[in-house]
Image: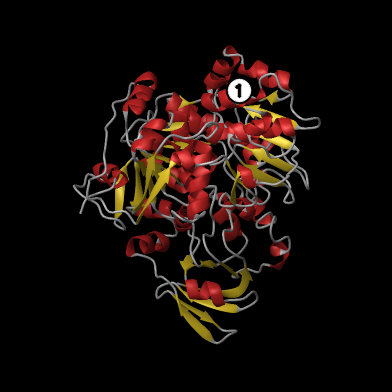
Amino acid sequence: MKASGIVHRYGDNVDTDVIIPARYLNTSDPKELAEKCMIDIDKEFRSRVKPGDIMVAGKNFGCGSSREHAPIAIKASGISCVIAETFARIFYRNSINIGLPIIECEEASKDIEAGNEIEVDFDSGKIYNHTKKKHYQGQAFPEFMQRIIKAEGLINYIKQK
Amino acid sequence: MGMTMTQKILAAHACLEEVKAGQLIEVNLDLVLGNDVTAPVAIKEMEKLNTSKVFDKDKIALVPDHFTPNKDIKSAENCKCMREFAMEHDITNYFEIGEMGIEHALLPEKGLVVAGDVVIGADSHTCTYGALGAFSTGVGSTDMAAGMATGQAWFKVPSALQFVLTGNPSNWVSGKDIILHIIGMIGVDGARYKSMEFVGEGVANLTMDDRFTIANMAIEAGAKNGIFPVDKLTIKYMNEHSIKPYTIYRADEDAEYDKTYKIDLAEIKPTVAFPHLPENTHTIDNIGDIKIDQVVIGSCTNGRLDDLRIAAKVLEGRKVAKGMRVIVFPATQKIYLQALEEGLLSTFIKAGAVVSTPTCGPCLGGHMGVLAAGERAVSTTNRNFVGRMGHVESEVYLASPAVAAASAVTGKISGPEELGL
């Protein structure tokens, strides 16, 4: 499984309240959530994002509220992968459970800049930066999680069981 | 190698003799929780499983608390979706607003969680029940859906940080100051993926409400769960609130911890977290002159009876500053009634505060106290992220009920000492 696209760049401790503010949680419709994704820290994100683009952030991405609306909003925005130095644990499992590919890589998180063109190979955990002509080694998923991701989420995985 | 308290509970619920940090396990659940924001998403996911049954109608709790009483039509539709699901599946523990409360205050009060339980909730502050010696953790809606259908969840067994508490907290210092102090020390990702296990002789000097507050905010340090040992006070609380059998687990003496912190509770001062992260802590003697517009006292963190008593003690016979908006929201209907009967609500209203029905509303900028651009609030809630309580240019300062109440009187961030208390 691979993803490739242009990078939207954020810092440390991006919390789920800024990914999708609570005032928009009166709906769970992915399209409506995508309209408001990142609005509190990046007003232009919605108009700038293209299908397949990649989000890169620093430490502890997705901290705070357990709202699954956050990875849903990111996925529905067209983002094909989130790369961060580390993820907050509830966001991490929510992303796997809904089938939003995410990958932890400190080196990539520190080096990749906004606008870089990135390609991610999930099987090997390799991240290629075509703009900087470099690559980084991210953490591949444990086998158990790969099975959930291949099933495109926890619900399908349980159905298959 | 020995196991931590958390690992022992998880091992028992995975039907394993032993588990190790990092191991992936499937555990049996004692309770699955959802609210009006997260349950509707879970209900839709569960429908995809083509299963017409929940695993156990007595082991699911559904609490409409976030945007209730319904703040708008979309919220009303979400509550309706959850209510209809509860009726269809004959869910025992669905709480309509007249009998409800903020979920993490309500569930222990209703006796639905006891020591040794494994609980998942589609709300990050589900970690609150660690105060009772249970393993409880926040998950998303899909995990909730899977939990409701199968009665199981997958976990990576966490390693742990140990906090050895000694001493007695000073006057006006409560659980909130202790947990803010700890988050300030280890950071918002200091316990990421880990358990926070609180032990030591100092635990006996903490009330149950202090322990609920501390366990509640374990997530603000990134923790998977926070947990307290079971002592006489825990047993008394469980006997008063629950008829469920409980199991007491203790960490093995040779359990390994990633790190051990020693904390003398007597040295902790009233602590305030500045915008925009709970780790930006300052002690009350190091605050400066920060004028505020609003004070919020309540939430799953600090809306319990002890919290209201402390706030009332500060506000008794005083008036809130001119122009100050003070919102008090008891966390459950039972607490509301107790506060009414004790005369606390009268104290709040005479001081110039409003008293709200239980709701999560103001804590997450939902309703009942949303902030405008440039406004500042002192709040006993748990998060001060950008835009958390309203406009992105508003600011939230997290504090204890004592500091919040004193600040309401002075109009700036203050400790009760400033009022001569």
Furthest residue to the right?
Answer: B323
Furthest residue to the bottom?
Answer: A133
Using the rendered view, name the quadrant where residue B331 is placed.
top right
Label 1 crowd bin: few (<14), some (14–19), many (20+), radius 10 Å:
some
Question: What x and y, as percent, mark residue B147?
Answer: 39, 42
Quadrant position of the C terminus of chain B in the picture: top right
Using the rendered view, name the quadrant where residue B172 is placed.
top right
**Residue A9 placement, left or right of B229:** right
Question: What x and y, as percent, mark residue B286?
Answer: 63, 47
Q: Secondary structure at mark 1?
A: helix
Question: What x and y, as percent, mark residue A142?
Answer: 35, 64
Question: What x and y, as percent, mark residue B8?
Answer: 26, 44
Using the rendered view, name the quadrant where residue B50 is placed.
top left
Quadrant position of the N terminus of chain B in the picture: bottom left
Residue at left offset 45%, top offset 58%: A96
Q: Is residue A61 above or below residue B171?
A: below
Numbered-mark total: 1
Residue at left offset 66%, top offset 16%: B346
**Residue A146 placement, left or right of B297:** left
Instruction: Give me the chain letter of mark 1.
Output: B
Residue at left offset 78%, top offset 47%: B373
Q: Nearer the viewer, residue B331 or B87?
A: B331
Q: Nearer the viewer, residue B67 or B334?
A: B334
Q: What's the residue type where badge 1 is placed?
A: Lys
Whether residue B290 is visible, yes or no, is yes
**Residue B72 placement, left or right of B270:** right
Residue at left offset 74%, top offset 27%: B320
Judging by the rendered image, the residue that carries numbered circle 1 is B313
